[in-house]
Amino acid sequence: MSAQPVPPSAAVSGPEPLLDLDEIQGNILAGFSKDYQTLVALKIRDLKAARRWLERILPEINSTAEVLKFNELFRMRRKRLGCDPKGLIATWANIAFSRAGLALLTSAEEADALPDEAFRVGLNDARAAGLGDPVVRGGNDPTKDWVVGGTNRPVDILLIVASDHPRELAAVVKRLRPNAKAGDVKGAPRVVWREDGATRSDLPGHEHFGFKDGVSQPGVRGLRSRQPEIFLTPRLLEPAAAGEVEFSAPGQPLVWPGQFILGYPATDGSSDSGGGPLDPDKDLPDLAKNGSFLVFRRLRQDVAGFRAFLDEQARLVSENPSFPGMTPERLGPLIVGRWPSGAPVARTPTSDLEALAEDDLSNNDFLFTTDTPAPALLPMVPHPQGPFAVAREDSAGFVCPHAAHIRKVNPRDQDSDKGDQFDTLTRRIIRRGIPYGVPLPKSATDDKVDRGLHFLCYQASIVNQFELLQQDWANSTENPKPGGHDLIIGQTGQPSPAGARVLRLINSTGSQAVTSTRQYVIPTGGGYFFAPSLTVLRKLAGLS
Amino acid sequence: MKIDHFDPPAFNDDLDDDAELKALWSQAMSTKFDVSVHSVQNHLSSHGGGICQFYNPVTAGLSGPDLPLSSGDVPWSGFPKRFLRSGPHGTPGFSDAEPTSLPPDTGRPQDEYLEWHVSRNSDGKIISVEFTCEGYDYYEFLAQNAPAKLVALYQEFIDPSVQREELFSAGTYNRFNRWNIQDGAMHLTNGANNLFAEVFLGASATVRRKNSTGAEITATIPLIKCGQYGDETRNSDPAIGAAVNGLARQGRMITLANPVGLYIASFDGSGFRLPDGSAADGFFQILRGKPGQALRAVYRLPQNLAEAGLTVSDVKISGAPIEFGGQIAQRITMKLTGVASLDQSVHNLPVGCGAVQQVNGAAAQALVAGAIAPVRPPTRNAAK
């Protein structure tokens, strides 16, 4: 959870829709934000038994309203206590269905009426190949060896259970998973895979390579209540001038909810409309409304390999007179775009700055094509911002390389091959990932332990959001701006070492390729799902 | 950047056996630059002055160091933005982007400096999709100065049976001839898809702009609306203009990399699969130019697969069958390369809105509006 105290909402008016928070599942807009999370993948065996199980667990599936209220209470208590409130815990559950699962519970026609080709096809071997997932040598199927999903381990249902406490989490998972003692009948869905994830105890909020994750999320427009008018995303800034991107907080652009929840106004990729809103699709089936598409990717991280790669490449780069003294500690942040603390390279180019990383009003406040102006904070917003240097114009990518991970997947104010900054808003996703596996100690050699990230993201279109980010940008040497591959998640579709990836460092005196002959983030499972509204869930369970 | 001549696009060898013709092409390009520079200079002069930040690297080359070349690369998607539908679930209008017939004497609606021609068999299955990004002004230059070469290119890339008279009407090269529209795509046909447009856009976009309140405009679409240097509904023009203007705001001098061209930078075939699941990403071949700087390319199956009865329509992209050439165009990234000085000492004041007008003057007008290129004196055998 955010460490920065913020006011609940500023009174900025706007024609924003009232969100049906009792209908929308809680992890999408509110976010569980828990330290412990278990994923359970299930296969439907018998339709009647599946409906009965679904009916049993329905009351345990949490809404956005519930999660928001808890998050608010947690924040209030922490503000007064100055630390996390012990004993104030919650355990949440959400559920999502693959196309196959949904077709079983409704019909093929109804499942295929959901407006996303990627969902309809599913994350199968062909779709994974489109994402550039590496094929196993001698084969064509990148999903062949996946531990969950893909060709050999198809999934109908994905259950997400999260808690502040591991014991509570285990108890709820046990309660929710199909079991005869709880009254489930023979033929209830079968658990085909389950795995625990947890924030790193040594570095909370960091992924296994050691970098702070999830710093930048879009600000979702929409109201929690009309009277009084309360925005889902608190507004900390003065409204933007006409024609400019509007931000809820420094570095957090506002995006219309239809980019994440079906049935709401969406962001227009054209600057003529100031980013929207676009009217919701009138032809959306009821099944779609208040639902969201969920992408799950189980990404194994080769931490030892990544560290060795940084050591080797830093040595090579340092031999180039344009990049003297390059170290692994400096090269890693150039590849990521942030320092391990989460401080952006754009604001602190030569060294990490913990205080900047901890300041939520500053750690995401940077543009790429112009000197970043001071944020116009509303008068009631506390402003503990330290004397941090602003991000300077860096159109050329001298400070933060164009292929740095955070610049690849969110070019901010810089044009992409697809359009300008308003188009980029339509590509944003809401990320809800969490690490799995134990961390590899800093000085340790490769222990061959499976560790990585349960990447989860929500969006209104898998094709135009997640897939575009992965395929068109992360995997490309040219897009959104030329500069090489995203060396964190970019892929070539080739097994190592054939699929070499390159990131180009440049400055005013020269350039240098950073070459990776292996992938250090390897997909090992996943699927495309749909997280329906609570009303639709009741229908899927056979209730009126 | 300082060079002594302009080369043909992608350093093609069309003119290699004729030094005079090569010089003539360089002169043609140089004229495009000169007209553009003079037009911008006039515009600045009539708006309070300033130094034109666009220059001709042949006649007014700069010997100082430049930014690394890749920092001037501007990419854009080859599939026309005008055929994308808005909204999170907007699917591209593939059939609109490649109409089966066009009105007489009109170019294709594909306006991102990439056009394509789809060949189908009698069953309507796609046999091949050919892509071109060559400006029509280069071919008009060939038509005027080396018509035999022009015909030879058509015969090599479109059909061996092409005859010279089929390419000309009343002695003038007809870019809408059947071999460039119905039966192939030798070069770009859309009215805006030419090299002079590229140079003029680059030059015009160096003019810094301000809005009615006096604030400098930096955002992409407001810039192109204010400077009127291109079509705001495209991927390409706004992106090129914004990138150039950004360099100009940094005080740099700007030109275009030699050889000037709008190139196919890359093709992404990930997820292209044959019915047996094997990869089909290797069937995109560059026919003219080179990787990263391609002028012409084709997507078609190798002979053994074609003989086995397979067509491009049997290929699926991430599970979706190929029904239109535009599905492949969507996977093509186009590129223009600008060159900007390391020096940042030019600090023009932004000016109000309005297009840079092309300079008057009979000679310039004749060169640009007409042939866009000088014509070899008739004393030589132009048709050799």
Image (spheres, coloured by chain):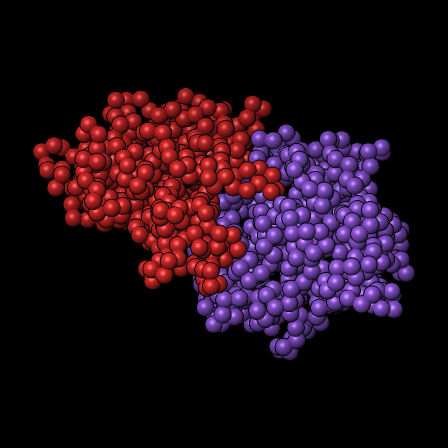
Chain colours: A purple, B red
Q: Position of residue B255 (x, y in %)?
A: 37, 40
Residue at (59%, 52%) from the top-left corner? A118
- Residue B2 seen in the figure: no
Position of B87 compared to B25: left or right?
Answer: right
User: Picture coordinates of residue A103 (x, y %)?
Assistant: 67, 54
The answer to whether A493 is drawn above or below residue B112 in the figure is: below
The part of the image, by quadrant, that contains residue A456 is: bottom right
Please state the total of marks drawn on the protein image: 0
Image quarter of the C terminus of chain B: top left
* In the depicted structure, whether residue A364 falls above or below residue B352: below
- Residue nearer the viewer, B302 or A254: B302
Residue A505 in the image: x percent, y percent? 49, 57
Going by the picture, which residue comes out furthest to the left? B379
- Residue found 33% across the figure and 60% down from its top: B307
Q: Is residue A40 left or right of residue B354?
A: right
Quadrant placement of the N terminus of chain B: top left
Q: Position of residue A522 (x, y in %)?
A: 58, 66
- The residue shown at (79%, 57%) is A51
Q: Which picture quadrant has residue B20? A: top left
Work out whether B256 lies above or below A342. above
Q: Is residue A213 left or right of residue B234?
A: right
Q: Is residue A488 left or right of residue B179?
A: right
- In the foreground, A213 or A369: A213
Residue at image position (55%, 35%) is: B219
Nearer to the camera, A292 or B339: A292
Q: From where the camera sits, is residue B32 visible?
A: yes
